[in-house]
Image (cartoon, coloured by chain):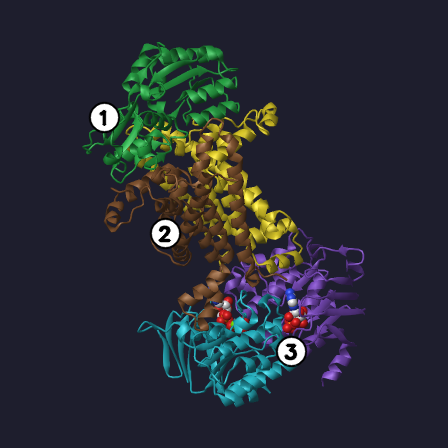
Chain colours: A purple, B cyan, C green, D yellow, E brown
Amino acid sequence: MIELDVRWKPRDFDLAVSFASPAKHLALFGPSGCGKTSLLLAVAGLRRPDAGRIRLGGELLFDSAVGLNVAAARRGLGVVFQDGRLFPHLRVRDNLLYGQYGKAASPALGLADVVELLGLTDLLARWPTTLSGGEARRVAIGRALLSRPRALLLDEPLVGLHREARSQVLAYLRRLRDEIALPTLLVSHQPDEVEALAEEVVLLDDGRVRRQLGVAEFAARRN
Amino acid sequence: MIELDVRWKPRDFDLAVSFASPAKHLALFGPSGCGKTSLLLAVAGLRRPDAGRIRLGGELLFDSAVGLNVAAARRGLGVVFQDGRLFPHLRVRDNLLYGQYGKAASPALGLADVVELLGLTDLLARWPTTLSGGEARRVAIGRALLSRPRALLLDEPLVGLHREARSQVLAYLRRLRDEIALPTLLVSHQPDEVEALAEEVVLLDDGRVRRQLGVAEFAARRN
Amino acid sequence: AAASLKPALDEIVALPEAEAVAGIKTSYAASSALARQIEAGAPADVFVSADLEWMDWLQQRGHVAAATRFVLARNELVLVAPAPSTVQLTLDRHTDLRGALGDAPIALAEPGSVPAGKYAKAAFERLGLWPQIQTRYVATENVRAALALAARGEAPLAAVYRSDAVSEPKVRVVAAFPADSHPPIVYPAAALQQHDGAAAQRFLALLRSAPARAVLQRWGFRAAAAD
Amino acid sequence: MLTAAEATALAISLKVALLSILVALPFALALGLALSRLRFPGKSVLEALLNLPLVLPPVVTGYALLQLFGRHGTIGAWLAPLGLQFAFHWSGAVLAALVMSFPLLVISVRAGFDGVDRRLEAAAESLGAGAWRRFASVTLPLSLRSVLAGCVLAFARAFGEFGATISFVGSIPGETRTLSIAIWELLNQPGGEAGLGRLVWVALLVGIAASLLAALLARRSPGAEAAHD
Amino acid sequence: MLTAAEATALAISLKVALLSILVALPFALALGLALSRLRFPGKSVLEALLNLPLVLPPVVTGYALLQLFGRHGTIGAWLAPLGLQFAFHWSGAVLAALVMSFPLLVISVRAGFDGVDRRLEAAAESLGAGAWRRFASVTLPLSLRSVLAGCVLAFARAFGEFGATISFVGSIPGETRTLSIAIWELLNQPGGEAGLGRLVWVALLVGIAASLLAALLARRSPGAEAAHD
Ligand SMILES: Nc1ncnc2c1ncn2[C@@H]1O[C@H](COP(=O)(O)OP(=O)(O)OP(=O)(O)O)[C@@H](O)[C@H]1O
Ligand SMILES: Nc1ncnc2c1ncn2[C@@H]1O[C@H](COP(=O)(O)OP(=O)(O)OP(=O)(O)O)[C@@H](O)[C@H]1O
Ligand SMILES: [Mg+2]
Ligand SMILES: [Mg+2]
């Protein structure tokens, strides 16, 4: 499903990651600063690697050897950013609908459903700056889902959510995974999230792949 | 230690919280959007309640009845904000030292110690925009600690930290709590953090106090 | 036309006689600006300049219908002082300008480029007075601005046209420059090449008419259409 | 009240200033974006060239326009056969006002674009927005205040333009005689100061109207204000 | 090369433009901050008054300055006994340049302050920074680009000022005869355009230097640039 070979070397850091996985649902797991977000942004087309290849679901998105770099806007990936990034000048409703512009309707992911499941009903007319941390997070998830993506890139999506909200959103994402088989690349520090959403886990450390393992093995090692 | 009676009523929300606690280490716990951050900002002097009183460690900080409102700059509180707020135009080192300006030296919290314990040694010359999520979080904690506060206000301080870093920082905060007895107001969604750092917990829901209980009882109810 | 002619020309254009010359459009600016506009192909039919230089400049470049050129008006150069001032001066080579000025400067239109200033400088040089004020003058954008400085009492003396001086009650004419101390102050008018000759002729005729001359006179110019 | 001639001059000034902004804005936005986002050789020279109408006395700009856009001018000679003529025409006043106010617009717009959080543009991109939509729906709204500030400055400058206008297209009543020129003529006329006060009031009112309009437009998107607690 | 008179005129222009910015900047910062952060009655009127020198032909501003600061002016009459005199003095040229460029400075600065994330100011406050330090260490650096843009605009405008200057203090060689006035004089003379090119080059170079300096200063704090991935 994903095939990735990425080099990125800013000052003070050296990312050199290469792996391939047939899994539709993959997680990146590793300590702070190991390169998870950089990798996710590279897949999204928002951080250009110095060199490498990225293939997702059979489509070649980036290949420095042939100078190929599909524009982020045409990759069709729904990204939940670690740092939120709601549009401050748009109300919650317009943030949610931003990614639907010019796209065909998707019955699986309608505004009403998403809004209800994420508990955003009362917030639709609000400005993002007035949202609490957890509320903003849920809007960011909703925005990514509603953009009718071909795959989801989730960078610590459930951070800042309280118990019930967290398990509810987790259950929802799991249902999406099972029902409409939306491929997922997940970054998370919470093993339970990884176990709930991923089939395979890539362990990263300091810009390198440490191990690649099935989620069962990941769970087993944890206990 | 803390005595609080706050009313704040923007559109769509109604915060009316009143409690007092002798505990030096208090946690606010409750679902997303229940008013934790608002309360913490009110204590910090950064969100002015419509009415009420706030007393911390014997000092009256806010009293709408007599028109008292101690400026945030003079409250001497170290805040870790839920949304980070590193100064983008200052390098990590200058972010860390920002709060020390014009204050007497504190032997308990020196730059070298804090930097080492938070694992920031290699990051001192970096600009905040180049930090990973977890790195930025640790800088924010360090900045608050190094401002020589009379108390700490922590809004989900350990979000985005990976296992080891998280337990390390948690241990450090716990040590500070025990050694220099720095009073703490903690907001967290993670029960283990609450249990490790607080003596007493105030459960909030939808802008109201639901319960106030000792940390032992909190832990007992959880299991 | 030159901006200094505006009040008079506006009145002439409003005369009943002007109805015969339908659709007159006037444009006032510094003569230099107008001359350059004409040179650049501005669709004007008649040019009235505040001095000879710019008219000559245009003529050399072949823009002027030389046969139609005539002197529309003449003017005089005078020295004015603020109305309350009590200075007494006659202008000859013994005049003590410095004494009259005190520590303030004399106001002139810019003597290098603005017509009134050029005349004033020539006159002071001819009278041998220029060394006295060479470092003591303030140059203005046009003659009206020099007049204004005197009117407001900022400058104890200013060299301006009589046509300007008579219209400003806040100044007093102290002395007139001898007519031979500077080149004659004339306002030449002419039709321009390649434009509506008939209309230009009608307009020039209007400028020459007796009522027009009366207007010019009333505004302090010496009409010179007879030349 | 205004005399008919003054009302005409006011109308011309308003027409000239509004048109010059309308025409200049797309170019200023494009150029501002290029200056903010691209690095290219000669960029500082381009910026300085932009500022040239500010650094030079307006007469020079008027003269340069005459050389370029006069009937026999470098560009004017090409336009004349097409029936396009600026000399002595109100469109020439628009051109002069545009050139004089353009730097104010570009520099403000550019500072606005500089301040936009690029991560939000990246988020828009990830949501499928192409360059155009990103600009129209994120970059522009988020720099609205700077753009409006630039428009107010440029409008005021265009409305008040005098030196370049009179040098380029002269003062033809009903055509190129703007309020500024009318005021200048008053000031150069015996006893003209009397009528001055009234026209200055008019200009002040126009300035107030422009500021108010900009403030109103800025307020339409409260979310775009700087975040606060 | 420049003639001695031209070099003097250039030196005066530079002195006048630099001094006018130096004097104006503190006021512009204070006023920009007030306009950005405070709501008070008559705010739009104040903004419009600020823009007045833009909306009016420069001569009018020059005359108004003469009325106020001339020897017998409303304020000038008070200052004269103190030995302070603007009329016919180069400091009057500074005053004229200042008044003409002030709106550009204030409006740019204000747009910059508008854009600063107030939550960062709150963070600074929580770290013990009082109003002054907050302004100097957070607000100002974060709006540096807009402030510099305003400085470039204002400097260019002050350097190129002509109409108000010549109306207020006239042209006194060695004292108030700026480069702009020298250029204007050239253009007023038949055949003067020959010497024009050289002086325009000088102005262009000054413009380039100002743009470069601003770009350099802006680059000193790369962190203050808009965040990006
Ligand atoms: N522009 C940059 N210049 C230099 N170093 C950078 C830059 N951006 C990121 N880094 C460094 O690259 C490393 C990887 O960053 P990244 O954001 O990918 O980490 P991460 O795995 O997502 O960590 P976290 O879990 O803390 O978010 C970090 O050490 C970070 O400091
Ligand atoms: N300026 C505002 N205007 C209107 N409502 C607001 C404003 N600021 C916050 N709120 C609302 O007040 C409520 C409390 O917000 P607060 O940030 O205190 O929540 P919280 O308990 O910290 O939640 P979280 O755990 O999600 O961060 C939320 O419902 C939020 O939407
Ligand atoms: Mg990350
Ligand atoms: Mg919160």
Name the one closer to the observer, B129 or B64. B129
Q: Secondary structure at mark 2?
A: helix
Give the residue at mark 1.
Answer: C90
Residue position marked by numbered label 2 in the rendering: E43
Measure the alpha-carbon separation of dots 2 and 1: 56 Å
Q: Position of residue D124 (x, y in %)?
A: 63, 57
Q: Could you tell me the amino acid type at mark 2?
A: Lys
The chain ID associated with circle 1 is C
Query: The disc numbered 2 marks a residue on which chain?
Result: E
* Closer to us: D75 or B209: D75
Alpha carbon distance from label 1 to label 3: 98 Å
Q: Along the horizontal axis of the image, is A168 left or right of D227? A: right
Left or right: residue D86 compared with residue A14 = left
Query: Disc 3 residue type?
Result: His
x and y, in percent, of residue A7 in the image: 75, 66
Q: Amino acid at mark 1?
A: Thr
D224 vs D77, left or right, is left
Q: Which is more foreground, mark 2 or mark 1?
A: 1
Classify mark 1: helix, strand or loop: loop
Note whether residue D1 is visible: no
